[in-house]
Image (cartoon, rainbow, N blue to C red):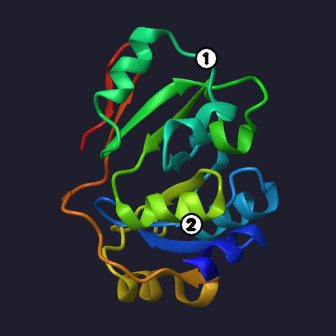
Amino acid sequence: MAAAARTVRAGGIIAYPTEAVFGLGCDPLDQRAVMRLLALKQRPVHKGLILIAADFEQLIPFVQPLTAADQARLAATWPGPYTWLVPARPATPRWLRGRHDTLAVRVTAHPLAAALCRACEHPLVSTSANLSGRPPARGLLAVRRQLGDKVDYLLPGLIGDALKPTEIRDLKTEQLVRGG
């Protein structure tokens, strides 16, 4: 865990287990690392990214203040495999939001992913460890096959029980954006 956190702090890209698949992550405020991750994945920046956190407090610098009702809605699903589109603070970098005024965020229930966020002392970018359009990696061997040695650190561990990547819902409309 310490080596993974050091890699993130040094601007590296890591692969780590999440609720359903292996994720690729980096420091969300390190533009160079995020752009390298997007290039590795062959993902356009306009789509935006997900941030995972160990707790909601890690997400506060990135999202607008929420109403009590919105906070309760999130709290009812977290920690857990639920990603929400939440209004982003104006200062939240475009390389995270893409072309959106919202940011996809999740308080992860995966113990290793949560421990990694705690070790880094901030949320992490979380996108599936695969090339765009290819199946997400569900193990370290699959990460290595798709991405080779382009990932700076591989955190061993088992993924969670979810069979598909987390669902994504818009917090304001509750509309399902991606099925889980």
Query: Does residue 174 sit above or below 152 in this rendering?
Result: above
Residue 42 in view of the camera: no
| Residue for point 63% across, 26% down | 88
Image quadrant assignment for residue 111: bottom left
Out of 31 and 76, give the one closest to the viewer.
Answer: 76
Q: Earlier in the sequence, mark 2 or mark 1?
A: 2
**Pick the front one: 33 or 114:** 114
Residue 22 falls in which quadrant of the image?
A: bottom left
Element type at mark 2? helix
- The mark total stands at 2
The answer to whether one can see residue 79 in this image is yes
Q: Which residue is mark 2?
A: 41
Viewer-nearest residue: 12 or 164: 12
Query: In this image, 174 relative to 107: left or right?
Result: left
Quadrant of image for the C terminus: top left
Q: Name the amino acid, label 2.
A: Lys
- Where is residue 41 shown, x and y percent of the image? 56, 66
Disc number at residue 37?
A: none
Q: Nearer the viewer, mark 2 or mark 1?
A: 1
Q: Give x and y (percent) for residue 177.
A: 35, 31
The residue at 28%/28% (across/down) is 76
Residue under label 1, please give it: 65
Which quadrant of the figure contains the N terminus?
bottom right
Of 131 and 164, nearer the camera is 164
* Residue at (37, 89) in percent of width and height: 141
Report which quarter residue 170 is drawn in.
top left
Residue flagged by tag 1: what amino acid is it? Pro
- Residue 144 in the image, given as x and y percentages of width and height: 46, 88
Residue 103 point in image, percent of width and height: 57, 33
